[in-house]
Image (tube, rainbow, N blue to C red):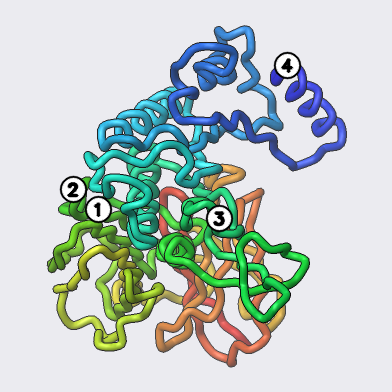
């Protein structure tokens, strides 16, 4: 049935010359993507292996990715790791990406093997948020997901469920000056944030579209310290998210290797029983040393701004690095075209324009389609600017004159 529907939809999109893409499947749990039994089993093989009778991986409107839910696969540390790793290995075989498209603490409580309390009743609101942070780590590292989504944004806290199923709490007015979760929402009420919201924010506010996960060593202890690191498309920012579910403060010493620059600015944001993604005001934003404290039972995001300009060469206007920028000189609000000989069509391009003092004055990203066009902002002062262009395989620099 899915094959018939997707094939029909693909044909319709192609006739309309539509750029819309179809995303399938959206499995109810990770193990259904690579195994299982019944009608919804082994979905990656069924849809993306050319030997399958349900093969649709060759349809041009089908995006090469699979999506799964993180329900039913978080009872133990082994299950958290093995199911996601198996899903990724299967997806990698067919060169497709992975998305996690729905999760909450549905199902029985995680076992104490995961470091979770003995039951949902014994768990605090912070415990629920910390486990969410840990599960996100597992989805990002073991399933290598490119996208992660929670189930419900807003709901009412009822039946002692605490915050298992939502990010923000709705509490209806009881019509008599108080609040009752079982009253009607039509009476009005209040909206409150929860630790779940801030736990998600420690990832989603800082890891933006286009960021890529990079190697981080020394933070892969399932019940003690978990960490993931990400770099921005222009390589000017690194974001590191640590989950420390243990009741022990950790101190880490960070070393940077094989990066295009060095950190010059640092910021720290903490979610815990007493913090809601709170910025650490005691930490100097000027990066001077690499020792960071991670408080007990917390999720901490560290943001590093990198100095990538010192290594950029001084170059002259016109054609250099086998690329051309025109018109050059240019003026504010003008469209400027970039040509890079030999680059493949549809390759991702990231452009940063730097002022003489090293500040980024414009960013733009997109697909290279026989050229790449950027529209200059309207507030650039006359003078020389450095254009840094990054493709998927190379970096280019060029000087741009604003008249």
| Relative depth, front residue between 62 and 199 | 199
Q: Give the labeled residue for mark 4.
A: 1
In percent of width and height, residue 192 lies at 55, 72
The image shows residue 136, relative to residue 50, as above or below, that is: below
Residue at the extreme bottom: 381
Identify the residue at horizontal 70%, vertical 38% (top origin).
Answer: 21
Q: Which residue is mark 1?
A: 226
Outermost residue toward the front? 176
Marker count (numbered): 4
N-term mark: 1 or 2 = 2
* Element carrying mark 4: loop
Please, what secondary structure does the residue beneath circle 1 have?
Answer: strand
Q: Mark 3 highlights which residue?
A: 158
Query: What's the distance in space between the residues labelled 1 and 3, CA to CA?
Result: 32 Å
Q: Residue at x 46, y 16 (%)?
A: 36
Q: Nearer the viewer, mark 3 or mark 2?
A: 3
Q: Dot 1, how many residues are within 10 Å of its Cα: few (below 14), some (14-19), or many (20+)? A: many
Q: Which residue lies at the image location 37% right of the left edge and 78% below the top edge?
A: 278
Q: Residue at x 37, y 33 (%)?
A: 84
> How far apart in space, not on screen, are marks 1 and 2 (Cα)?
6 Å
Quadrant for the N terminus in the image: top right
Q: Earlier in the sequence, mark 3 or mark 4?
A: 4
In the rendered structure, are the residues bearing label 3 and label 4 in contact, judged by CB atoms less than 8 Å apart?
no
């Amino acid at each position: 049935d899915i094959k018939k529907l997707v094939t029909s939809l693909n044909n319709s999109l192609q006739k309309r010359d539509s750029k819309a893409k179809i995303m399938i499947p959206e499995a109810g749990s990770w193990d259904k993507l690579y195994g299982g039994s019944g009608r919804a089993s082994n979905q990656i093989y069924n849809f993306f292996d050319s030997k399958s009778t349900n093969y649709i991986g060759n349809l041009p409107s089908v995006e090469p990715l699979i999506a799964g839910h993180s329900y039913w696969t978080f009872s133990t540390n082994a299950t958290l790791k093995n199911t996601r790793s198996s899903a990724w290995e299967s997806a990698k075989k067919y060169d497709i990406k992975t998305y996690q498209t729905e999760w909450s603490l549905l199902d029985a409580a995680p076992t104490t093997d995961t470091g979770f309390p003995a039951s949902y009743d014994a768990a605090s609101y912070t415990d629920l948020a910390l486990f969410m942070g840990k599960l996100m780590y597992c989805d990002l590292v073991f399933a290598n997901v490119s996208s992660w989504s929670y189930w419900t944004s807003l709901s009412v806290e009822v039946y002692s469920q605490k915050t298992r199923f939502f990010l923000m709490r709705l509490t209806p007015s009881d019509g008599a000056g108080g609040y009752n979760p079982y009253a009607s929402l039509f009476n009005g009420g209040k909206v409150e944030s929860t630790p779940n919201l801030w736990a998600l924010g420690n990832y989603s506010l800082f890891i933006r579209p286009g960021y890529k996960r990079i190697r981080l060593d020394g933070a892969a202890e399932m019940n003690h310290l978990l960490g993931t690191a990400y770099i921005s498309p222009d390589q000017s920012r690194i974001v590191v998210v640590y989950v420390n579910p243990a009741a022990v403060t950790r101190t880490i010493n960070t070393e940077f290797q094989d990066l295009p620059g060095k950190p010059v600015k640092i910021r720290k944001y903490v979610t815990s029983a007493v913090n809601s993604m709170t910025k650490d005001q005691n930490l100097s934003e000027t990066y001077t040393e690499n020792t960071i404290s991670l408080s007990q039972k917390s999720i901490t995001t560290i943001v590093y701004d990198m100095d990538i300009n010192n290594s950029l060469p001084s170059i002259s206007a016109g054609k250099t690095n086998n690329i051309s920028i025109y018109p050059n000189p240019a003026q504010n609000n003008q469209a400027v075209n970039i040509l890079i000989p030999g680059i493949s069509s549809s390759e991702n391009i990231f452009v940063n324009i730097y002022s003489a003092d090293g500040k980024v004055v414009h960013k733009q990203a997109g697909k290279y389609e026989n050229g790449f066009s950027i529209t200059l902002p309207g507030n650039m002062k006359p003078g020389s600017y450095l254009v840094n262009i990054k493709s998927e395989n190379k970096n280019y620099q060029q000087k741009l004159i604003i008249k």
